[in-house]
Structures are given as C-alpha cells and as structure tokens.
Image (cartoon, rainbow, N blue to C red):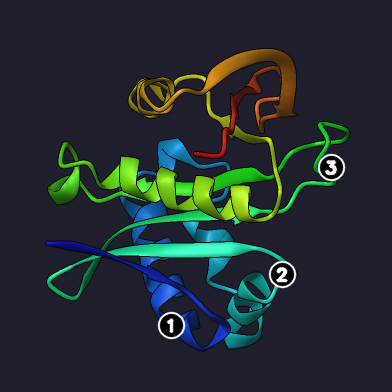
Amino acid sequence: MVRLRVVTTDDWPLWRDVRRTALAEAPHAFKSRLADWHRGGEERWRARLEMPDAYHVVALLDGRAVGMAGGMPGDGDGNGNGRPPELRSVWVSPEARGHGVGGRLIAAVESWALRTGATALRLAVLPGNAPAIALYERHGFAATGEPGDLLADGVTRELVMVKALRRS
C-alpha cells in the first residue's frame, strides 16, 4: 500500500534521494539535470525544503520512495489576481506507475493549494512528455496557451497548464 508523507526540512536526505532518483530515471522529464544537484550538500537541500509556504510530499511503498511532488506558492492574492501556486517536481517510479500514485500526489498538492486559499493550480511541463501531459489532463489540467519558460535549446518553451480548484 502506498502512503504519502509530507516532507519537512529534517527529511532532506529522503527528498534528496528521491529527487536524484527521479532525475536519473527520467532526465527527459525535467529541466533540471542530475549533475545540477550534486553540488551544495545538506544546506542546498534544506534550503529547497525551507522555502516559505512550499509543500513537498513523497509517496512511499513498503518504506521505499516511489514518487514525489511539490507545491510552490504563487504570487496571487487568492482572488484570481496574480499567478496561482504551482505543482512541481512530479515523478512516479516505473514500478509504481499505473497504480494511481501520480493522482494521489496531484490531489495532495491540490489540497495544499486549496488550504492556502488558491482558486487555481498551475504547472509547466516539457512539451514532449506525453505521459505527464496525459496524467495532468486526466486530473483536470488544461493548456493555457501562455508561453512557458524557454528551454535550453533556445527555441522550445514549456507547456503551461492550469486547473481551476473548487472547494468541496
């Protein structure tokens, strides 16, 4: 059974290990590269987890990390003004794919965003990552047409997607 664990700064070794595993297993899915995260040590990993109002969650299967996701605060005011919070760093290990882990991670970040008063959740995905795009579409995200960040090739841009959030 998969269990979700909210990660705190004291869990930096767990976050480091799952992030490095994600970057090694699916380098095509992230702007960051594994080599970018070998520098900095504990301070850099703690700093990532200490970002004010951020949210990080890891999926565990029999004590092993099999997925991760993060939520980064937006600069919005909760009334639709400004940029909404972002879903980031979503990854599910090959062994756990197809078992609803990605959906559970997304739902956890959506719940966090709702608790912050957000009315939408935003994400940026690499345009060639069809499995991730399909996952996000299944969970209610839609492309915005907004130009995403420019990628390393200097031509391609991230695909920006957004989902309206509703309180239940």
Does dot 3 land on a helix, a strand or a loop? loop
Instruction: Give SS at disc 1.
Output: helix
Q: Residues within 10 Å of mark 3 (few under 14, many from 20)?
A: some
Q: What residue is pinned by disc 3? A: 76
Q: Quadrant of residue 26?
A: top left
- CB under 8 Å between discs 3 and 1: no
For marks 3 and 1, the one nearer the N-term is 1
- Which sits in the foreground, 86 or 25? 86
- Residue at image x 51%, y 89%? 10
In space, the residues marked 2 and 1 are separated at their CA atoms by: 16 Å
Residue 159 x, y percent position in the rendering: 60, 21
Q: Nearer the N terminus, badge 3 or badge 2?
A: 2
Name the residue tied to disc 1.
Answer: 13
Question: Circle 2 is placed at which residue position?
Answer: 51
* Element marked by disc 2: loop
For the residue carrying disc 1, how many other residues have a C-alpha within 10 Å: few (<14), some (14-19), or many (20+)?
A: some
125 sits left or right of 144 in the view: left
Amino acid at dot 2: Met
Q: Quadrant of residue 15?
A: bottom left
Is 16 or 120 nearer to us in this picture? 120
Circle 1: residue type: Pro
Q: Please tell me which residue is depicted at 15% across the width and 42% down the height of the picture.
A: 99
Q: Quadrant of the N terminus?
A: bottom left
The CA distance from mark 3 to mark 1 is: 31 Å
Q: Write the residue at 71% across / 65% down.
A: 53
In the rendered image, the vertical position of residue 38 relative to residue 120, given as above or below: below
Does 7 sit above or below residue 113?
Answer: below
Q: Nearer the viewer, residue 125 or 154?
A: 125
Q: Measured from the top left, where is residue 91 in percent x and y?
A: 37, 48
Q: So how many labels did they put on this image?
A: 3
CB-based contact (under 8 Å), mark 3 and mark 2: no
Q: Residue at x 12, y 72 (%)?
A: 62
